[in-house]
């Protein structure tokens, strides 16, 4: 019996000694945050590991969680859809850069109305979410859709109950087009929803589920969720006065307008309600945060190398998942900002 | 208590009178270690309960200090202005539990009576097992079923029907959304039903046949025997079953989150969406970053902790009182 234990112990020691260098070689980088870019980050990470052997773990815990975790230094990088302010970045010793852009889309469940048939403008959308327009055959909706047969049904507003970057982007738009929304509700990852008939779901899939289940409802989700669940979306009137359908092209049209040279530190730039005939009005970017002072030079370098690879080779993957890649110019600006990242006083990039 | 003291004494005397067992040092030590270990195990539970309570109090202090009693009375819940009040969550928790109890209590009594008194043994066995299987379904399944199957049924059939005939009551007014307080209460009722009916069945089964037969012998009908003999006889156990269901309904999270609608609003209508303390915590905790927001959520948790604690204390007290009053027969 004793002999058996001894052999067993010896085996464990030998195994540990041989396994340790193998584990050390395979760098593991941990990130956490926004759920909006999660499908893309996990694909990038998978491909990158196949190519380089570097393992990137990204946990989809939400923007709020990402900010909290990177500030607490429990992860190597954090993800958020609501960019931190330059002051907040300086205070916490962080840099921040955008990775991809995407669109938020209003979805509906109204009997007899198919995808893209209903047209709304910003102010009517805001009034629906404020509860001022509360029937589908309200004159305001009828005026925009003279050819549609609208039922005399109460409108139920579906929204996120968890703090979410999608809500941040959507409320930014409503506040931009409606002064009343700006004063009464405001902008945030979580807000107080004023409409009388409002229901909440957790996550993009939660809102999609509520809209599917409740007749006469309207909600908002990230574009990919509307496509996956085949829920009818709404055409929106953009700043140029044209009604546009959500698509990768209309997101790109909006993104092309953005003047990133004017962006403050941290690239916090609003892509909401951009000019241009084909621009989709509700577009936002998602961001990565990391510490300026990296405790582990090798790890810090690996993170930057990963995002450099993603910028240069991940564009097609992003488009396949309906995200808009960052323009060439912006990538150069972002990579210039990486010069700030240091470890023990030495810059890690390039 | 008196009886207990007396019996203690007799055992003590018994030990003194008995021939002491030969004890080695090792067994004496073993006994002491064992006693210590069991004591630690037993004391761990109250220690954890106390620690949880203290921690909740400590973390929720910023919110309680900022809002004071307003926290309990206000139904404003606005993360943008950082203004938090628990009233709508407390109301939703109580209302959904009340609806669940109103439906589950008579239903579980009926099920238990049928299984024990009226059904043929074969039927009773099969149906009894199936009801117990209800308890084995995870609550997330109830939630998904509730949202995708039950809620549309409620919206197309049940709620329009109720609205048509009882719509003059504020309780049944408003558009039929399918999800809301009534649906949440119904799902909760289905979830607590197996627990309540299983205990009620055991309680009824414990009523001695002699007692029932003598009632029948006096010419009582089945209804009279049930109403005047079986139920009063098992009242203590039935109360226990009720409190078990109540405790479960108060804290149920996942299924309720799916179907209650998660709106921070107090509305008289049962058709309207609402929220419960547990559903709010499940929805918002992971994403709350501002310290006051987190603290307010923890304060909600503290309220739930105190409510369930209170329910248990009242239950224990009631049970003890009832036991003294009714136990003569048992």
Image (spheres, coloured by chain):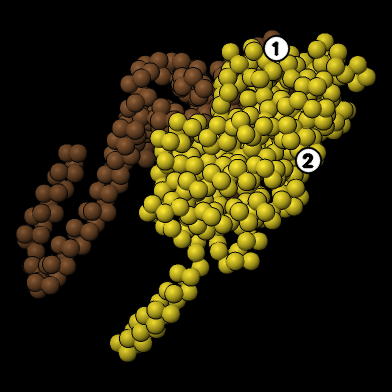
Q: Nearer the viewer, residue A300 or A208?
A: A300
Q: Earlier in the sequence, mark 1 or mark 2?
A: 1
Q: Does residue B152 appear in the picture of this structure?
A: no
Q: Residue at x 8, y 55 (%)?
A: B13
Q: Which mark is residue A248?
A: 2
Residue A203 in picture, x, y percent from top left = 62, 38
Judge by depth and name the residue closer to the eye, B230 or A96.
A96
Q: Which chain is yellow?
A: A
Badge 2 crowding class, 10 Å Cα cut-off, few under 14, some 14 to 19, many 20 or more, is: some
- Label ID, residue A319: none
Q: Position of residue A42 (x, y in %)?
A: 62, 54
Q: Nearer the viewer, mark 1 or mark 2?
A: 2
Quadrant that contains the N terminus of chain A: bottom left
Disc 1 residue crowd, few under 14, some 14–19, many 20+, Cα 10 Å? some
Q: Residue at x 71, y 51 (%)?
A: A315
Quadrant position of residue A130: top right
**Residue at 58% across / 23% down in the picture?**
A187
Residues under numbered marks 1 and 2 in contact, where contact means CB atoms less than 8 Å apart: no
Q: Could you say where residue A159 lies in the image, as x and y percent from the top left?
A: 64, 28
Vertical relation: B11 (above or below) B144: below
> Label 1: which residue?
A132
Q: Provide the letter of the chain coloured brown.
A: B
Extreme right residue here?
Answer: A147
Residue A112 appears in the figure = yes
**In the structure shown, which secondary structural element does the residue marked by tag 1 occupy?**
loop
Query: Could you say which quadrant of the image residue B263 lies in?
Result: top right
Q: Position of residue B277 (x, y in %)?
A: 48, 30
Is A22 situated above or below B39?
below
């Amino acid at each position: 019996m004793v002999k058996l234990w001894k052999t067993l112990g010896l085996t464990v020691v030998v195994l540990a000694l041989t396994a340790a260098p193998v584990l050390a070689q395979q760098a593991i980088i941990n990130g956490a945050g926004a759920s909006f870019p999660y499908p893309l980050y996990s694909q990038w990470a998978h491909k990158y590991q196949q190519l380089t052997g570097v393992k990137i773990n990204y946990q989809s815990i939400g923007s709020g969680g990402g900010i909290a975790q990177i500030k607490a230094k429990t992860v190597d990088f954090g993800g958020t859809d609501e960019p931190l302010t330059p002051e907040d970045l300086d205070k916490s010793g962080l840099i921040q850069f955008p990775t991809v852009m995407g669109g938020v889309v209003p979805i509906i469940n109204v009997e007899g109305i198919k995808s893209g048939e209903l047209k709304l403008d910003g102010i009517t959308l805001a009034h629906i979410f404020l509860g001022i327009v509360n029937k589908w055959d309200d004159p305001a909706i009828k005026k925009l859709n003279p050819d549609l047969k609208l039922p005399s049904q109460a409108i139920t507003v579906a929204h996120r109950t968890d703090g979410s970057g999608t809500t941040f982007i959507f409320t930014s738009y409503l506040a931009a087009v409606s002064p009343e929304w700006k004063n009464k509700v405001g902008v945030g990852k979580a807000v107080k929803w004023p409409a009388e008939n409002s229901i909440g779901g957790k996550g993009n899939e939660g809102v999609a589920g509520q809209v599917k289940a409740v007749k006469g409802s309207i909600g908002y989700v990230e574009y990919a969720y509307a496509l996956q669940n085949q829920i009818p979306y709404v055409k929106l009137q953009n700043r140029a006065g044209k009604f546009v359908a959500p698509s990768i092209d209309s997101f790109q049209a909006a993104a092309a307008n953005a003047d990133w040279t004017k962006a403050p530190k941290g690239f916090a730039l609003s892509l909401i309600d951009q000019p241009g005939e084909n621009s989709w009005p509700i577009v936002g970017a998602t961001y990565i945060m990391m510490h300026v002072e990296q405790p582990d030079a090798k790890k810090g370098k690996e993170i930057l190398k990963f995002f450099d690879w993603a910028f240069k080779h991940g564009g097609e993957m992003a488009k396949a998942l309906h995200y808009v890649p960052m323009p060439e110019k912006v990538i150069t600006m972002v990579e210039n900002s990486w010069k700030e990242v240091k470890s023990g006083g030495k810059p890690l990039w390039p | 208590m008196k009886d207990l003291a007396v019996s203690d004494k007799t055992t003590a005397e018994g030990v003194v009178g008995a021939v002491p067992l030969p004890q080695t040092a090792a067994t004496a030590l073993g006994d002491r270690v064992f006693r210590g270990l069991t004591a630690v195990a037993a004391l761990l539970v109250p220690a954890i309960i106390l620690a949880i309570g203290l921690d909740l109090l400590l973390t929720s202090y910023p919110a309680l200090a900022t809002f004071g009693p307003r926290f309990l009375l206000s139904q404003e819940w606005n993360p943008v202005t950082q203004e938090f009040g628990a009233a709508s969550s407390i109301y939703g928790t109580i209302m959904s539990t009340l609806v669940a109890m109103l439906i589950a209590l008579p239903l579980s009594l009926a099920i238990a009576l049928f299984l024990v008194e009226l059904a043929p043994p074969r039927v009773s066995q099969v149906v009894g097992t199936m009801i117990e299987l209800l308890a084995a379904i995870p609550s997330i399944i109830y939630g998904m079923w509730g949202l995708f199957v039950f809620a549309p049924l409620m919206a197309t059939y049940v709620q329009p029907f109720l609205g048509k005939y009882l719509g003059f009551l504020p309780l049944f007014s408003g558009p039929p959304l399918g999800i809301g307080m009534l649906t949440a209460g119904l799902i909760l009722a289905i979830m607590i039903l197996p627990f309540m009916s299983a205990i009620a069945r055991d309680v009824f089964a414990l009523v001695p046949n002699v007692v029932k037969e003598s009632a029948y012998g006096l010419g009582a009908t089945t209804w009279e025997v049930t109403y005047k003999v079986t139920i009063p006889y098992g009242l203590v156990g039935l109360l226990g079953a009720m409190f078990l269901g109540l405790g479960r309904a108060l804290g149920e999270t996942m299924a309720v989150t799916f179907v209650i609608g998660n709106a921070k609003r107090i509305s008289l209508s049962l058709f309207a969406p609402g929220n419960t303390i547990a559903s709010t915590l499940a929805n918002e905790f992971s994403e709350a970053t501002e310290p006051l927001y987190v603290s307010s959520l923890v304060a909600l948790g503290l309220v739930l902790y105190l409510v369930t604690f209170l329910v248990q204390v009242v239950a224990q007290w009631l049970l003890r009182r009832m036991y003294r009053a009714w136990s003569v027969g048992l």
